[in-house]
Image (cartoon, grey):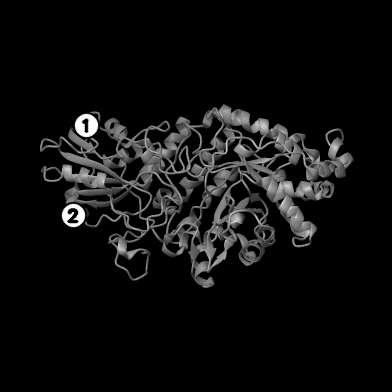
Amino acid sequence: MPPALRALFLVPVLVVGTVLSSAASCGKDATDASAEKYPYQDASLSVSVRVDDLLKRMTLEQKIAQMTQAERANADADDLAHYGLGSILSGGGSVPASNTPAGWADMYDELQKGALKAPLHIPMIYGVDAVHGHNNVRGATIFPHNIAIGATRDPALNEKIGRAVAEEVTGTGLDWDFGPCLCVARDDRWGRTYESYGEVPEIPGSMTTIIDGLQGTPGGPASVLATAKHYIGDGGTTGGKDQGDTEISEAQLRAVHLPPFQEAVKRNVATVMVSFSSWNGAKMHANKYLITDVLKGELKFSGFVVSDWNAIDKIDNQDGFTPEEVGKAINAGIDMVMVPEQWKLFMDVLKGEVDNGHVPVSRIDDANRRILTKKFEYGLFEHPMADRSFAGTVGSAEHRTLARQAVRESQVLLKNENKVLPLAKTGKIFVAGKNADDIGNQSGGWTLTWQGSSGAITDGTTILSGIKAAAPGATVTYDQGGQGLDSSYKVAIAVLGEKPYAEYQGDRPDGLSLDAEDLATLDALRGKGVPVVVVLVSGRPLDIATQLPGWAGLVEAWLPGTEGAGVADVLFGDYKPTGKLPDTWMKSFSQQPINDKDGKTPLFPLGFGLTY
């Protein structure tokens, strides 16, 4: 999902006709609900009874508001009080002034107080992209990206990661995570490849255990709504183009891209986010067959469907909401609409589409029933304010230990000539490369900001510091460019690969080779009579077949996050490498897309991984 567009001004509160009519037409229910307990406020009643009671008290305007999600930079507590918005979100990098657990919880409580002032006092729900840890929060535990978790083949570990993320999200007051991404990435040119657990549906399907960890017992401690995204086929677009067109048959769509969502529904995932992409030219956000007939009907998904960032505005490929777009999206089965900036316009347009009969009231009621059911199930009516008891879990030692385990389990040993690995913990070790001592690079995109960035952007352990800590008896020399290596060293470790990126900017239609800086580093290490072990920090397989013969060892470290010591755990043999490739590794870029059993000869096949 794209980030907030940084419109850091607050939209003025305009108490327009729809708002006034909303409050006025509710009568006693709108103004006096707090003075008298209504059935929907009685926690002893069943959720279905409470939803039925609340729905009959709501006006059309209130129902439309529940279906509307605005970005925090464009809606404040007064907006929530006047309009009764159903949800707020943070885009990537959209954070409170104090980017701390307390700062987040204070922001959440202020907004929630506004929501509870609205007629009928329906709590809002706050969504965030906690896609590899609570990655918007400085100091949070940053876990490896999904492609690395796919390499672990360890569903139990992923459930534990989900639980840790739920605790950290809860500790900042929030209650809804836009994860996990269950895409099946079929083309490494796609900039979101690292968000996929693997190229075959069995791997992301097995990793839906993270949903159990995130959601826990709905309404219980640290219970966070999970989101299966992006429905459906976003990993199969032609050319690996982000938001592109997945041009395959329905049989292929069902065989490759649907199974992880089937698994998510079996785990009672609370929400599903629709993909920006198209299927055979038809925008997913307008695809009633796949959203209503297949997801809600055939799969029996009982949660609610949320759109992606401004995505219904892209149905006609023109800027600006149109009544036709809004009508198509809602009738297709979208229940909550993410409209970061122009949420007031959306509400007015949707009301017009209902008033003119283009969107039936029954569709509005169904959307509200789904949204309100989750708000009741997850205890928001009884406990609407931030639960600060989990604040101490944010970046805790326990969670960092778990992340370090995930890092070491995800390391894939691809080459080990003359058993150069594991490394001895004595003698002279030379370390080079732009990704050796850069926590931003090793964390990748979706870390503090949407695209991520290089440098010391948050707290953690770089790969270099992990190497130094793992071998206190060795002399470790570091030069980023590789200058100074001589034959007195036992080994040179070159930590190379990609710099951070996310969607759009991460697409690589022209090549996946090492960059000029990496090639220069390798040149500096070549011909010194010292074996070179390359550690790749990347969100996908890279085009390295030409350089590989000059390397004694190759370890794919993926995007490990804040716990770089997990890489050193494997390099020095404290733990044997157990990771297996979740993606087929190309011999050359010209093979893209390359996948298991497609007849192309890879450099390394799906599932490949050596050990000691």
Mark pair 1, 2: CA separation: 25 Å
Residue 476 - label:
1
Question: Callout 1, which amino acid?
Answer: Val
Q: Residues within 10 Å of mark 2 (few under 14, many from 20)?
A: few
The image position of residue 333, as x and y in percent, is 67, 59
Q: Which residue is mark 2?
A: 549
Name the residue located 76 percent from the left edge and 49 percent from the top edge: 63
Secondary structure at numbered mark 1: strand
Q: Residues within 10 Å of mark 1 (few under 14, many from 20)?
A: many
The image position of residue 197, as x and y in percent, is 44, 53
The image position of residue 134, as x and y in percent, is 51, 38
Secondary structure at numbered mark 2: helix
> Which image quadrant for residue 171?
top right
Question: Callout 2, which amino acid?
Answer: Pro
Q: Tell me which label, 1 or 2, sits earlier in the chain.
A: 1
Q: Is residue 240 visible?
A: yes
Would residue 545 be found to the left or right of residue 295 on screen?
A: left
> Which image quadrant for residue 574?
top left
The image position of residue 466, as x and y in percent, is 31, 34
